[in-house]
Image (cartoon, rainbow, N blue to C red):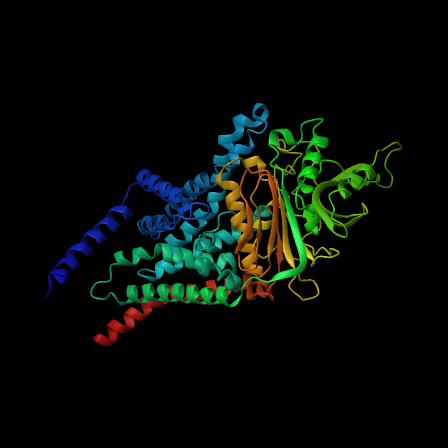
Amino acid sequence: MTLADRDRPAAEGRLHRLADRIGGLGVRARLGLAALAGGLSTAALPPADAWPLGFVAFTLLLLLLDGVRGRLWPGFWTGWAFGLGQFAAGLYWIGVAFFVDAAAFGALAVPSVLGLSAGLAIFTGLAGMAQARAAPKGAGRVLFLAVAWVAAEWLRGHLLTGFPWNLAGASVLAVPALAQGAAIVGTYGMGLLAVAVFAAPALLLVREPGDRRPAAMTGGLILVVLAGVGLWGALRLEAHPTVMVPGVKLRLVQAAIDQKEKWRGGMKAQHLRTHLDLTRGPGFDTITDVIWPETAVGYYPQQEAEVREVLARAVPPGGLLITGAPRVEWTPPPAGAPAGTEPQPRVFNSVMAIDDRARIVGVYDKAHLVPFGEYVPLREFNPFPKLTAGSIDFTPGPGPATLALPGLPPASPLICYEAIFPGEVTAGAAPMVRPGFLLNVTNDGWFGLTAGPHQHFASARLRSIEEGLPLVRAANNGISAIVDPLGRIIALLELDRRGVLDGPLPAALPPTLYARLGDASAALAGLIVLALAFLPGGLGRRIRQRGN
């Protein structure tokens, strides 16, 4: 027996004692450590990409849940505390928006962030409850946690309008080869792998007297899948060099207008001139099409011919200006309404394509509106106002659409955070409706120089990989970028810089598996992982029985 062999039992004993101490913590210590672990988990995501902290965070979560095995509510509150820490650390930047109008909303910043974090943490609480009550003993509980976590993320992304921000699968963007797995199972599916990998150190702490094979088998399986996805992704990146759409050169305008000035009375014309001057700057004669960000135009172009004439000056000959702008429709009074009843306005947050003859040749209305930013939920009962200018709620559009654009491939427009919803960024995957690129116009000026705009851009890049479509992103204060259909950045204009970004338009790839199946591919992967979660213990029992 070597010295290392004699030392191994002692080292394992220390690890087991550490696991026992973590699992046996009292209520306050357990919830406090869970919240701390949740905060650490955010660092494994963009923009920090400090993925080693993911191992610490999810291993701690699993050990804490081991300590409340079989107890529903302690499991829920442990998961909830982890989520509270994660969302408070990851979504702190939302509080910055309240200081755009500090006199009216500044005092609500901290309570709103904590309240939102507490609400979102209900979903992680459900994952903790499922883990505590239903997870198998032994090595399989690592795989079960991955399924429970991603199931909770999917619910968070769909219930109550959905908010799939900072999904665990976003951590794979730190390794471009691994990120290619999103083309098969989407970001939810990659979350299964991420959580399983991050929680895998707990396998060292599994107490299986006399038989380490189930833990070794589970750990080996996780490593094999991780290596397989990485190898496949590396081959995919090598096999698909970026191909450009011939004859297209885009100019993305990033005016970096301070949000406090954006809707200030009398400044609409100045902001329009800023966009126009940047557009017509050096190199204008070399570009084919121009893209401005969300609500770059503060007027109503459909109703104001003189505004369209000004906008036409930003259009290259034979090309297009694609810009965010509000749109209004007037709804006539219903039949039987009292005489003198005025028509009611319906205001949309829209994208408009304008040609060099000042004609609007394409319109898309935002469908997925931001609660309290663009409308007030249950307004008749809700005392909280909108953060944005104006008292009228925006009206949602009909949903994802493919916008035909003269001289360009068809586009799938995504306004602001519509780009964060996996599987909901195109109108369909059939060839006759499949777009040629994702067009994301946004205004992240609300959130200043924080992690928020970086997280938003990371989500948009994942949509590009999932769908096999290039991404063109114009943001008021950044991050503006052109991304190819494998998530590779072709051109980028950093946060809080005023300028233009000129670049080609990458060509789309054929529809990916995820583009064809959507979240069904992630669900199938989840079912396989769930089945495997209960397999290691069964195999261990069979091995021991044969040994006897």
Answer whether residue 95 is visible to the viewer in this image: yes
Q: Residue at x 24, y 76 (%)?
A: 546
Q: Position of residue 4 (x, y in %)?
A: 14, 60
Extreme-top residue of the structure: 103
Q: Nearer the viewer, residue 439 or 143?
A: 439
Q: Residue at x 36, y 58 (%)?
A: 142
Answer whether residue 135 is visible to the viewer in this image: no
Q: Residue at x 29, y 73 (%)?
A: 542
**In this picture, residue 431 sits left or right of residue 36:** right
Asked if 172 appears above or below 98 in the picture, the reply is below
Numbered circles on residues, count: 0
* Quarter the N terminus occupies: bottom left
Q: Quadrant of residue 404?
A: bottom right
Q: Position of residue 491 (x, y in %)?
A: 56, 50
Q: Position of residue 94 (x, y in %)?
A: 52, 36
Extreme-right residue of the structure: 339
**In this picture, residue 366 sits left or right of residue 446:** right
**In this picture, residue 416 sits left or right of residue 199:** right
Q: Nearer the viewer, residue 116 or 249?
A: 249
* Quarter the C terminus occupies: bottom left
Q: Position of residue 504 (x, y in %)?
A: 62, 55
Q: Quadrant of residue 13?
A: bottom left
Q: Nearer the viewer, residue 208 or 39?
A: 39
Q: Nearer the viewer, residue 88 or 417?
A: 417
